[in-house]
Image (spheres, grey):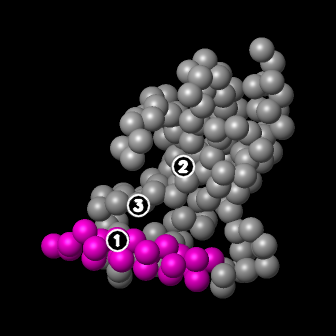
Amino acid sequence: MYSKEEIKQLRVSFWEKFGQRCEIHPDLMFKKRKWILHRTKIKDVAFRFDVNRQNAQVILELGNRNENLRLRAFEFLERYKVVMEDGFEDGLIWEFFHEREDSNKQVCRIYTQLDGVDFHRQNQWPDIYNFYIENMLRLEDNFMSIRDLLQEELKQE
């Protein structure tokens, strides 16, 4: 069992090693900014990586506090489900309602998940990193192909 400080250090090490892995990945090594994350150009639409003791996730999160706008964005993306899921063999998980543990904030999530991995097991980190890189690149590309349409949809009030 790890102490709180050991878990904190393990998390720091996990993300540092992930950054190092991204620096040498052929699809990422020459990119100035590796990931879009919060730079989607749409307020409260962000990409996230998440890992815990059971799984790893690559997430597109809709976090607008205005429930109507958040749900409108989710419904818009659902209409483009074929585009969003392109290249994802088993599709994506569409979660209409999710309460974030870190903030109790209500969000919508669209994500893919790698089950059976535990970030405490450092020997599984390469598998998690490969999953992250492959799936985030795909999710970002799919999203970017419809981002402008989503921006227009959310401007209409």
Give the mark, 3 or 1, whose residue is nearer the N terminus: 1
Give the extent of the magenta segment. Answer: 1-22
Give the mark, 2 or 1, whose residue is nearer the N terminus: 1
Give the mark, 2 or 3, whose residue is nearer the N terminus: 3
Q: Residue furthest left?
A: 1
Mark 3 closeness class: few <14, some 14–19, many ≥20 residues within 10 Å: some
Which residue, given by chain and number where applicable, does mark 1 sit on?
8
Numbered label attached to residue 59: 2
Which residue, given by chain and number where applicable, does mark 3 sit on?
51
Distance between the alpha carbons at the discs numbered 2 and 3: 11 Å
Instruction: Measuring from the top left, give residue 26's x and y in whole percent.
Output: 71, 80
SS category of the residue bearing label 3? strand
Residue 139 seen in the current view: no
Q: Are marks 2 and 1 in contact (CB under 8 Å)?
A: no
Query: Which residue sits at x=39%, y=47%?
Result: 102
Would you say the magenta stretch is mainly helix, strand or loop?
helix
Instruction: Measuring from the top left, give residue 54's x and y in whole percent.
Output: 30, 58
Instruction: Measuring from the top left, give residue 131's x and y in whole percent.
Output: 52, 66
Kind of residue indicated by mark 2: Ile
Distance between the alpha carbons at the discs numbered 2 and 1: 22 Å
Q: Residue furthest front?
A: 5
Q: Is residue 80 left or right of residue 102?
A: right
Kind of residue indicated by mark 3: Val
Q: What count of labels does the image hold? A: 3
Give the vertical position of 133 relative to 47 (above or below): below
